[in-house]
Image: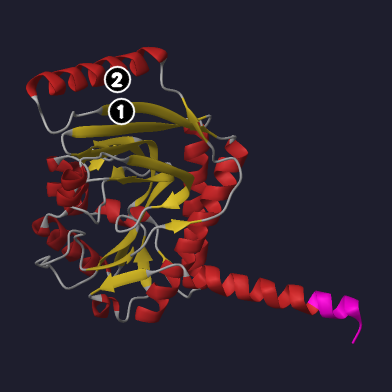
Amino acid sequence: MSVLLVRILTSLLFAIGLTAAQAQSLSLASDNLATFKGARRVVIDHFGVEFITTLKARGQGGGSTANIDAKLEGVSDEAMQALTEHAYQDTVSALTQAGFEVVRTEELQTQALYKELMAKIAHDAPYVVDDPGAYSRIFAPAGMKAVFKSGSDNRGSIGDRMDAFNSKYQGEFSDVAKSLGVYLVRFHYLASFGSTTSSKGFLSSFTGKARAAIEAGPTLMAKSTLVQIISHEGARIFAGSPRGGNANIWLEDPLTVKSEGYVLEDTTTAESKRGDGLANALSVGLNLLTGGRGASQQSNKTMAVTLSEENFSESYLRMIGQARDAFVEKLASAR
């Protein structure tokens, strides 16, 4: 066997192994998929790509604080909308190829109850979600409204969460689906340009140090990247599940892909640095005067990741595509 052939085979085996490792890194969880058994006709009545444009890392420890706000720069609303449209069309194609009949949403609009329910929970896109961990906006395909989805009880406003997890609404959506002989499949991707870590809890208080950090890179966030299914079984009591729906599939762990250009730049102003320095000096001085056991310190930083729209679209679509394929495969195996 020639040296060249050996090298080619080695490269192919490496690529196969790398692909398998990447596929294994995507971790899905689900609940109550038995209710999707027999599904053939589906409607994608909610489709949202929620873009995090500001990440907030908040660390505490021993009276000290560390705060970082990082922003996504260089990406226009038009690029986010175009990506959402692309991801939606790819999802329709993937479901069709998997053997589902994808029914147009206009059929739902003939139902008075459906329109009444959507008026209660849907919003013009892009819809802003501002919570302690991030600032984001939900984009929807043209002609669709934005609908808040979450797999966590600390995202969004109280009103957002009440609408998302309302069992009465979900039961009525189920009645509509049953009357039309369709299943509603609702895709939601919580997409970020990075992830946060921070100190909190008893251990951080014990050590007396506050830490906050942001790691840049395209990331689909766990728990709230999901598919919600509305079947024909009526209202469901969502014991232990913050997602609503008759059944759900969700990303159990964050999904990241490698991409160049995701670099954090420190944008903290000199004024902010002086303010932290003065506050920390005063804390040390007061601690010395009072004989305290430790001075509290504060750190407030701002950062930014600036992307080209080409890089943004390529990396996000690749990441969303990997999750979409796994979701559709799970749906197909459950029907």
- Marks 1 and 2 sit apart, C-alpha to C-alpha, by 6 Å
Q: Position of residue 186 (x, y in %)?
A: 32, 58
Q: Main structural element of the magenta stretch: helix, strand or loop? A: helix
Q: Position of residue 212 (x, y in %)?
A: 32, 40
Direction from residue 44 to residue 266 in the image, left or right: right
Q: Position of residue 31 (x, y in %)?
A: 24, 73
Q: Position of residue 159 (x, y in %)?
A: 13, 41
Residue occupying the point 56% across, 35% down: 307
Q: Is residue 294 or residue 101 the one in the foreground?
A: 294
User: Which three-letter amino acid code belongs to the residue tagged 1?
Assistant: Ser
Is 318 part of what is drawn in magenta? no
What residue span does the magenta drawing correspond to? 1-8
In the rendered image, which residue does mark 1 sit on? 299
Residue occupying the point 26% across, 51% down: 149
Give the residue furthest to the bottom. Answer: 1
In the rendered image, which residue does mark 2 sit on? 276
Question: Pointer 1: residues within 10 angstroms few (<14), some, or many (20+)?
Answer: many
Q: Earlier in the sequence, mark 1 or mark 2?
A: 2
